[in-house]
């Protein structure tokens, strides 16, 4: 499965659909999809280094829009769809309740969204919690833009600066690259239990 995902990612990075794929993965990751958009963005930027900032910004826009879907799930459908997503990610109710409680004040909500959006913690958990806590929409929007743009611009800059090295490493160390991606996802899930 991971090998197929890698092959698909590399194929899309070279196709005319590269931007659409990056934006699609960014959108769905912010609300329910388990895999982060970072690996796709990294490969696409490494293949298209002259469009690094553009791809980072489009990835940010898609991620923030997807975040509003996650917010809506938490706000309107928490007891059905929201709970199902949290259960799927094996999130402990106590940690989620603590996160929601801390988001009760807009200042704290802004800092929490910014901080957690930069970590491997799945961003969808943050967006759903924001909706459930009824975080001010402007605060949610600003914090989401800050954290997502920072993450994607830094990643894109690295991949632009070291694009050829990134591609060479990925091509020569396919198994290691897959392990790194999986490790990032696993670490994100683990952090849900301990630092959420």
Image (tube, rainbow, N blue to C red):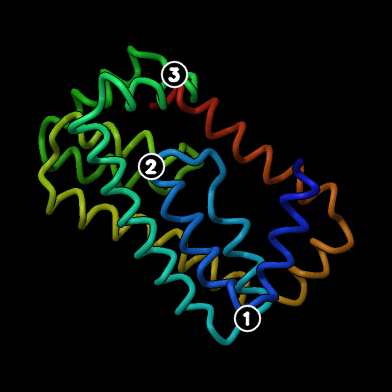
Q: Quadrant of residue 97?
A: top left
The quarter of the image holding the N terminus is top right
Q: Which residue corresponds to mark 2? A: 31
Viewer-nearest of discs 3 and 1: 3
Instruction: Specify few, some or many for label 3: CA neighbours under 10 Å numbering under 14, 14-19, or 20 or more.
Output: few
* Residue 137 horizontal/vertical position (percent): 13, 48
119 lies above or below 18: above
* Residue 103 horizontal/vertical position (percent): 18, 32
Q: CA distance from mark 3 to mark 1?
A: 38 Å
Q: Which residue corresponds to mark 3? A: 87
Q: Is there any visible trace of residue 190 in the rendered image?
A: yes
Q: Earlier in the sequence, mark 2 or mark 1?
A: 2
Residue at the location (67% across, 67% down)?
Answer: 12
* Residue 122 horizontal/vertical position (percent): 46, 38
Mark linked to residue 48? 1
Q: Is there any visible trace of residue 162 in the rendered image?
A: no
Q: Earlier in the sequence, mark 3 or mark 1?
A: 1
Label 3: which secondary element: helix
* Residue 183 horizontal/vertical position (percent): 67, 37
Left or right of 90? Residue 172 is right
Q: CA distance from mark 2 to mark 3?
A: 14 Å
Residue at the location (18% across, 38% down)?
Answer: 108
């Amino acid at each position: 499965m991971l090998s197929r995902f890698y092959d698909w990612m590399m194929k899309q990075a070279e196709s005319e659909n590269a931007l659409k794929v990056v934006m699609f993965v960014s959108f769905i990751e912010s609300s329910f999809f388990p895999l982060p958009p970072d690996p796709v963005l990294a490969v696409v930027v490494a293949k298209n280094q002259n469009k690094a900032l553009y791809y980072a910004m489009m990835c940010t826009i898609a991620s923030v829009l997807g975040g509003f879907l996650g917010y809506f799930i938490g706000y309107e459908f928490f007891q059905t769809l929201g709970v199902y997503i949290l259960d799927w990610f094996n999130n402990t109710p106590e940690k989620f309740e603590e996160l929601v409680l801390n988001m009760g004040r807009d200042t704290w909500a802004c800092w929490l969204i910014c901080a957690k959006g930069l970590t491997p913690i799945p961003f969808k958990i943050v967006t759903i919690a924001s909706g459930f806590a009824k975080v001010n929409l402007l605060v949610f929007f600003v914090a989401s833009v800050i954290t997502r743009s920072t993450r994607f611009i830094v990643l894109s800059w690295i991949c632009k600066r070291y694009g050829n090295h990134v591609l060479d490493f990925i091509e020569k160390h396919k198994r290691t690259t897959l392990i790194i991606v999986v490790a990032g996802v696993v670490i994100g899930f683990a952090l849900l239990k301990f630092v959420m």
